[in-house]
Amino acid sequence: MAEHIIKKGGVVYGAAFEKGCRELKHVGARKLEELPKLYKSKYVQSETGNVFSEVKAALEEGKPVLFSGCPCQVDGLKAYLGKEYDHLTTIDILCHGVPSPRAYNRFLDEVSAGKEITSVDFRDKKYGWGTLINVTFEDGTVHYDQWNGNYFKAFLSGLSMREACLHCQYAQPERVGDITLGDFWGVANYKENWNDKQGTSLVLCNSEKGKKLFHAISKQIARKEEVAYEKVIEISRKANAALVRPTWEPEMRKCFFKHLAKGDSFSKALRYAEKAIMDIGIVGWWIETPRSNYGSSLTCYALYRYLSDEGYSVAFISPPGFDRAGAGKFNKENGYRMTAKYDMEHMSENNKYFDAFVVGSDVLWYYDAMIRSGYTFLLDFVDDQHKKIAYSTSFGNLRGFFPQEVLPKVKGLIQRFDHIAVREFEGVEVCRERLGVHAEHVLDPVFLTDAKHWEQMAQKAERKTDGEFLFAYMLDPSPEKAEELKKLAQKKNLKLVSITDKQFNPEGKLETLKECGVLEGASIYEIIYHLKNAAFIVTDSYHGYCFSLVFRRNYLVLVNRSRGGARFDTLGELFNIQDRFAEKVAEISENEALHEPVDYTFLSKRIEYETDRSKKWLIRAIESNKYTTEKTGKSEGKPAIFTLLKKMLG
């Protein structure tokens, strides 16, 4: 077809390699000897550059033009031209999707070992119709990569695919080109003797122009047969999916690109993705059903989302002693990756699948609660070759601190951590004074997560209160609190809505709040919706306090000292907002100062600063070399003896 257009005095546009086969660009050919550079498949993104304007100029001169490219490029050209040209014929390629240029060049870096490249052939047919990459070097040597070699593994699986290709609107039977060209994979399902192992092409004539061009050159084709279009689609559904749907996104695609971005070789990035070796395993209370402990579920969700958005491959690790079945629906809806469930004896199996382990967040170092899973939350199962990080972990109420008889074991495990950050100022002191390790203070993960995730979560709420309302999120409601809430709602002329959790006497809690607009069996989406949209919030929950700040709501906090006051005091001191605390129930309706709107003018800047600081701490901990911080090179989270030994050993 290209030769036919050239002989008519026309121009052919297609993809050609430049700069030592490192770049693929669309160019024009006006002579027969220029055509070979446009031939053959090239599995990498082609830059169109200024070629659309060149095509238009040739068309305006009245020259016949043949343009070939991916269907998105063909449609792009048509949109650019803005009108039909009778002497323009377009060919769209039956496209599996295109690998990223970064991935392609990283592959060449690896196989060339610094040698100059003279040619790359993605479809060398030395061994038949399959895919054999042939990279030829200036010194005459050749690298062969089989169809099941690294490049094609990444390409065919979708790991190296550009993101847009995974949502391609052109991977469908309705085509944009006058002609569609591709391999007729599955042709043996039509007629077995048509598969000669050297390749059978599929040619779809999608317009009268396409039919005209095909018939003009059909005498030069040795063997051809018309196939019913419905039959082509039927065969393609099994063997040639590019004609019916986009490539599905592999679960480990982000992991692949994260390793390339870090400078890892193509084969290393592929190995991590194929073996599902992930960057980070999160150890926390994510497994509790969100209808029983909202705070645990939300803080784990937030940490998972933030790290995923940063490009890390992340999965939740199932602690032994916890039933994760109750959280199944929430986990599935939010696309969590989860490890297999191991008992305490076999938890070390997780070392095979992660580079780093993060304990986070919430009250994970409260002895009475922690011990049901052994010392999992102290990462006793993680070996010394893997990084161990604690982020925003809490000791909770210190009445539940580790008993004296287990303290030596606890110290030994905590001193194995590479980096430790805790949620309360009190926790920093505990680490230093009682456990002999250095710890930083950071914010709860709910501050780190992009606002879009909370918005999406709020939109999933089935019950949404209309108009302005006062929202009471009460973990420990009492008749006295219920009366005060009703008084405040009446004083502010707001509808009263309340939610409580299902830990500890859920029926009694619901009974207590029955006249406070309680949403029985509230989902995690409903609590986020009401926290985000309330005109005023009253809460005795730490996470209710956090979300009041995240969403910049007017609020007052009834400090819940029975569950541990340090968490409230830390945020109050950090942001200088202790004046929003009610220590006594009667203050809910009586303390007029607590009812004033919150001035977020300065407070928002302070929240943003601390959020940014916390994010940087976590990313630095993940990216640093084991046992050292990237910034200072000093031991962090290690006992003094460790630093001394490092100096002695150089």
Image: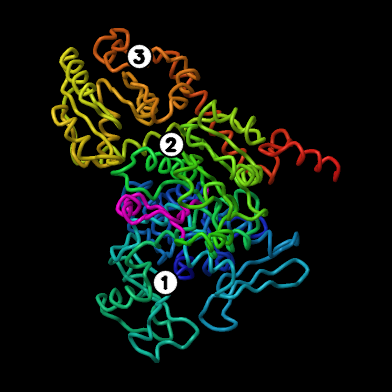
Q: Is mark 3 on a helix, strand or loop?
A: loop
Residue at image location 62% in from the left, 67% down from the top: 120
Residue pictured at 64% horizontal, 55% vertical: 383
Identify the residue under disc 1. 182
Q: Report how far apart the C-alphas of labels 3 and 1 lie in the structure.
A: 63 Å
Answer with mark 2 or mark 1, whichever residue precedes in sequence: 1
* Number of other residues with Cα within 10 Å of mark 2, as a class: few under 14, some 14 to 19, many 20 or more: many
Label 3 vs label 1, nearer the camera: 3
Q: Name the residue under label 3.
A: 598
Q: In which quarter of the image is residue 90?
A: bottom left
Snapshot quadrant of residue 126: bottom right
Q: Nearer the viewer, residue 612 or 101?
A: 612
Residue 137, position in %: x, y? 72, 67
Q: Which mark is residue 309?
A: none
Q: What element carries label 2?
A: loop
Task: State the residue at coordinates (24%, 33%).
Answer: 499
Q: What stretch is highlighted in magenta?
A: 312-339
Name the residue type under label 3. Val
Q: Quadrant of the C terminus?
A: top right
Which label lies toward us, 2 or 1? 2
Q: Name the residue under label 2.
A: 449
Measuring 40% from the left and 63% from the top, which residue is drawn there?
247
Q: Is mark 1 on a helix, strand or loop?
A: strand
* Residue 641 seen in the figure: yes
Q: Observer-nearest residue: 466 or 257?
A: 466
Measured in 3D between alpha carbons, the distance from the residue under mark 2 to the one under mark 1, in whole angstroms, is 44 Å
Q: Residues within 10 Å of mark 1 (few under 14, many from 20)?
A: some
363 falls in the magenta region:
no
Taking the magenta stretch, the answer to whether it contains residue 322 is yes
State how far apart marks 2 and 3 are (Cα).
Answer: 22 Å
